[in-house]
Image (cartoon, rainbow, N blue to C red):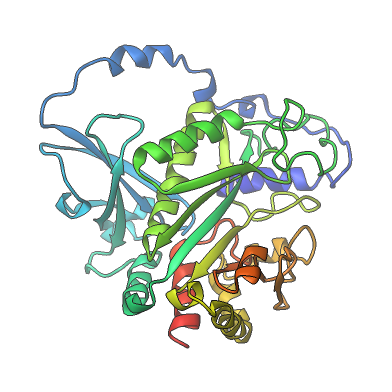
Amino acid sequence: MHAIRSGLSSFRKTGAQTCLLIKRSTALKHSPNHVMNKTVVERFSKIPWPKERILAMYVWIDGTGENVRAKTRTLDFIPKCAEECPIWSYDGSSTYQSTGENSDMFLIPVAMYNDPFRLGNNKLVLCETYDHKKEPSATNHRYCCKEAVDSVEDQDPWFGIEQEYTLLDMDGRPFGWPQNGYPAPQGPYYCGVGADKQWGRNILEAHYRACLYSGLNITGTNAEVMPSQWEFQIGTNKGISCADELWMARFLLCRIAEEFGVVVTLDPKPLPDWNGAGAHCNFSTKPMREEGGLKVIEEAIEKLRKNHKKHIEAYDPKGGKDNERRLTGLHETSSIHDFSSGIANRGTSIRITRQTAEAKKGYLEDRRPASNCDPYSVIEVLIRTICLNE
């Protein structure tokens, strides 16, 4: 993510909507994965699996709070749930989570999914990270999130998250963009169709199918306003599973893009004069979904108004600094400094959909979370503000 940001920074310096010559390093034009002969792999993929042995790929969030890591171990049984998978260790000094003098950290399996790459009985295992004292690591926000969610089980909180992302070439330029300038202005790209409007659809389609195979509740996709920017939606899910599945969906997206030699960035504002990328969070409780729920939603919005700063700090890994570039009041965003709400208004902090307003019950959409947010932090702060009145 950090290397990609330096590439994006170089691109931004050319000035939006200008056509300056961009110096491109020939070494960075294509990922080595792009030119690798993939047909060779097919020879080995036909080798039959030994009976009662599977591969379990452990996936976890590293010390950046934005990126995932993964490694694989062989199991001599087929686990029925994550809790049956063994606890494992890893080198935290290589993931920005510990020092070399005391590097061992622990992976605690918390959720398990089908592996769309290795197929068969092989598994993907999402893990929480713990330090040498067996305490949650600094970027393990799942632990506190689960405590908050479990404490309001009677309110039956539901979540749905709309993940926007941008595809990049290896030099940090949005995938498919002209080498010596910019594409035509925004307008025809959102949900657009055609070779002159969309680049990277194959990645989106592969990701969609992989998520479904894995067992994730992916409920839709679409092309976004900026070319080479896309979106997928996870949920509606009950409780913490929405955040679990979003992290696994992010892993699958990056892993699939790797096969195509393309980079995925969750930077909230890849370019200054184009639409940014968010992770809008749809939230409801049982009282919101029942008759008269609109009044409960309006009361929740007032609680969010009083805690705007707290939520901004929780909605991106930099405590609001990344989101500050995106929440400008332009390009379908509200200002980061002001709280606002409205019906069917995409320029507000909180949007009530037209359907919710007409039915007088439903859910609210928090449009403030950045694309690189930690969904555990988003879910936790919503629960604590709206359900626990903190």
Q: Please give left or right for residue 351 compared with residue 41 in the image.
A: right
Residue at image position (51%, 68%) is 283
Residue at image position (78%, 50%) is 274
Q: x%, y% of residue 290? A: 48, 75
Q: Is residue 5 above or below residue 202?
A: below
Residue at image position (43%, 74%) is 286
Query: Looking at this view, is 85 or 366 the one in front?
Result: 366
Q: x%, y% of residue 338? A: 73, 78
Residue at image position (72%, 43%) is 190
Q: Please give left or right for residue 122 compared with residue 238 in the image.
A: left
Numbered disc total? 0
Q: x%, y% of residue 92? A: 33, 55
Query: Looking at this view, is 314 or 65 the one in front?
Result: 314
Q: Is residue 15 above or below residue 259?
A: below
Q: x%, y% of residue 30? A: 60, 25
Q: Quadrant of residue 383?
A: bottom left
Q: Please give left or right for residue 219 compared with residue 15 in the image.
A: left
Q: Quadrant of residue 316?
A: bottom right
